[in-house]
Amino acid sequence: MITMKDFMELVDYKITEGSAYGWTCYGHSAYSLDSWNGIQDEGGFSFNITFDTKTQEVYEVNACDFTNDRAYRMINPNYIQKHAYEAEARGCHKDQAWDNVDYVDLEVDDDFFQKALAIQAGEDYDTRVTVPVEFSDEDMFRYMKLAHERDITFNQLIEESLREVIDSHDRDPEGFLENYKRTQKDER
């Protein structure tokens, strides 16, 4: 998870406002700092960090791109469920950033930084989400060989495979779930 130091360097130590965090999902010492460039539309952006004032643990960071109506967020994995529960208890849409814009949740620090830096610079950026995947050495070698045989990059192969799984789920969620359960049972 991104640290306070990482965030402060990202915003060049320019903090425009701060306040106690209004929800309890992150505890009673949660505090938020904002870095906003003062523009709400074309060319506008803001970054926010919510952290613990006693331990400095980071609970959440977000980047808002007002030019393109996009919002990105990373929630500390230890608090995702608590955040979701509190949003539900408050009757809030847990993913809403503003008006009709939802947060896109990110899992990889570098993905957040790349998007945030591009937003700051007013540059185009990749809106796809980086997904962490882990493979055994044997599987990695097998997939790299397959990518080579198909004359595509390893990343292209993985992205294609993930898209196929998502499309399969979207076409038949019930069948997808049953197939998943069956394969898990077979692997035991």
Image: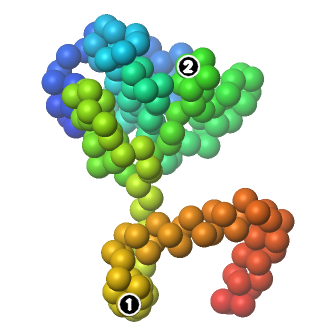
Tell me if 154 is positioned left or right of 185 in this view: left
Q: Is residue 12 visible?
A: yes
Give residue 79's mark: none
| Whole-percent x, y for residue 11 in the image | 22, 25
Per the image, label 2 sits on a secondary structure element best described as: strand
Per the image, label 1 sits on a secondary structure element best described as: helix
Query: Looking at the picture, does residue 176 appear above or below residue 104?
Result: below
> Looking at the image, which residue sits at the far front?
151
**Identity of the amino acid at label 1?**
Glu
Tell me if 112 is positioned left or right of 24 in this view: left
| Whole-percent x, y for residue 112 in the image | 34, 42
> Would you call the spot at circle 1 few (<14 residues within 10 Å), some (14-19), or many (20 or more)?
few
**Identity of the amino acid at label 2?**
Trp
Q: Earlier in the sequence, mark 1 or mark 2?
A: 2
| Quadrant occupied by the C terminus | bottom right
* Relative depth, front residue between 97 and 67: 67
> Would you call the spot at circle 2 few (<14 residues within 10 Å), some (14-19), or many (20 or more)?
few
Q: Residue at x 54, y 67 (%)?
A: 162
Q: Is residue 2 visible?
A: no
| Whole-percent x, y for residue 136 in the image | 41, 84
Tell me if 179 is positioned left or right of 166 in this view: right
Q: Which residue is mark 1?
A: 149
Q: Which residue is mark 2?
A: 98
Would you say the residues marked 1 and 2 are in contact, meaning their CB atoms lie under 8 Å apart? Answer: no
Judge depth for marks 1 and 2 and give the one in front: 1
* Relative depth, front residue between 99 and 167: 167
